Each structure stands twice: as C-alpha cells, then as structure tokens.
Amino acid sequence: MPHRALCPGSFDPVTNGHLDVIERTSALFEQVFVTIFFNTVKVPLFAPEERMDLLRQATAHLPNVVVDGATGLLAQYAQAHEIGVVVRGLRAVSDFEYEFAMAEMNKQVYGELETLFMMARPPHSYLSSTLVREVAQWGGDVRGFVPDCVARALQQRFGGEPR
Ligand code: PNS
C-alpha cells in the first residue's frame, strides 16, 4: 500500500489553499513530498530557493512533510522516490479538464501512479497564486490568503504599508 504521497505544484507562492491540501494530505499518509516543479512557470515571481524557503516555513509544523524542488517529469520523479499517490486540490469544475488530462498522462508515464483529488474547502475555492500575486502587486492586503511568511515576502517585494 502506498505510504508516500506527492503534493506537486508551482507554489509561486504557496497559498492557504495549498497549505490546507498539504495539511489534510499529511494526516492521511506517512510521508508527504511537497515538490516544486521549476520547469512550469515561465517567468516566476519568486526564485526557486525563495519558493522552497517559503514552503519550508509554511509547513514547519508538519513533521512528515518533506519540501523538495525538481525539474522534469512528475511521473518520473514519483517513480524515483517510490511515491504511489499524487494529491491535487480541485477548486472548481474549471480545474477538472486540465487535472483529468494531467492525471491520465502521468499514469501513461508511470502506470502504478494514482492521482487523488481533494476538494478545496469553500474559503479557498477562489484562491490562486496568480490572483494573490496580482492583489499584492497593486497594494492589496493578502494576509487572509497566504501564510504570514508569504505575506511578508510579498510586502517586501512590492512595498506598500508595513504590516
Ligand atoms: O501549481 P500548478 O502550476 O498547477 O502545478 C502544475 C504541475 C507542477 C503539477 C505540473 O505542471 C507538472 O506536473 N509539472 C511537471 C512536468 C510534468 O510532469 N508535466 C507533464 C504533466 S502531464
């Protein structure tokens, strides 16, 4: 039985929605790899090391979570790390088509890999890193949407009132 799960993403930056899925996954599996795939975002806001650092701070309370970074195919990464399950959050029906295609493609590459979907909880169902970046960029308050360390990093990046 799989005891290791993978929560993959771009995490540019990690949001409270990501964190909710990571926390719920960490309660279900012995070990959870939270892995940033760096080949996905063309022009990221945060550099790879910054994203890893923010993710480490945000998950410091979860002892069975390992934060990692990778390039290349998710399915190959899962196979190399003996991970049997990918967990992805689903926010709305609009996520479904992309996630469905990705889950099937990953299974084509590594046949033993299963993808499980976790419904985003209502407070996070509209949240995305893209919208958080945009709100922060134009001086909006993002403290309700992201972990404190990320709010501080965004404030340093874009300026605005000290909080
Ligand atoms: O947070 P995101 O941007 O929705 O995460 C997307 C991610 C990282 C899960 C996806 O782009 C991915 O798996 N990238 C690794 C490369 C890969 O395996 N691509 C083929 C997937 S079918």
Image (spheres, rainbow, N blue to C red):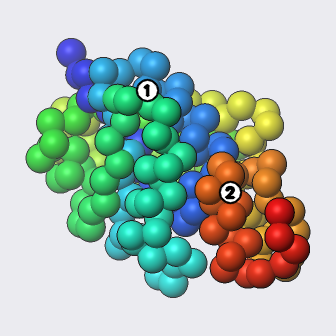
Distance Cα–Cα, label 1 vs label 2 = 21 Å
Residue 146 x, y percent position in the rendering: 69, 52
Instruction: Determine whether the residue tagged by mark 2 lies in a helix, strand or loop.
Output: loop
Would you place residue 42 above or below residue 115 in this image? Answer: below
Residue 65 lies in quadrant: top left
Residue of label 1: 26
| Residue in the image at 74% along x and 42% along y | 125
- Mark 2: few/some/many CA within 10 Å (<14, 14-19, 20+): many
Q: Amino acid at mark 2?
A: Ser
- Mark 1: few/some/many CA within 10 Å (<14, 14-19, 20+): many
| Residue in the image at 79% along x and 54% along y | 143
What residue occupies the far left of the structure in this picture?
A: 80
- Image quadrant holding the C terminus, namely bottom right
Residue of label 2: 128
Residue 144 x, y percent position in the rendering: 80, 48
Left/right placement of residue 26 relative to residue 66 reads right
Q: State whether residue 101 appears in this view.
A: no
Residue 30 lies in quadrant: top left
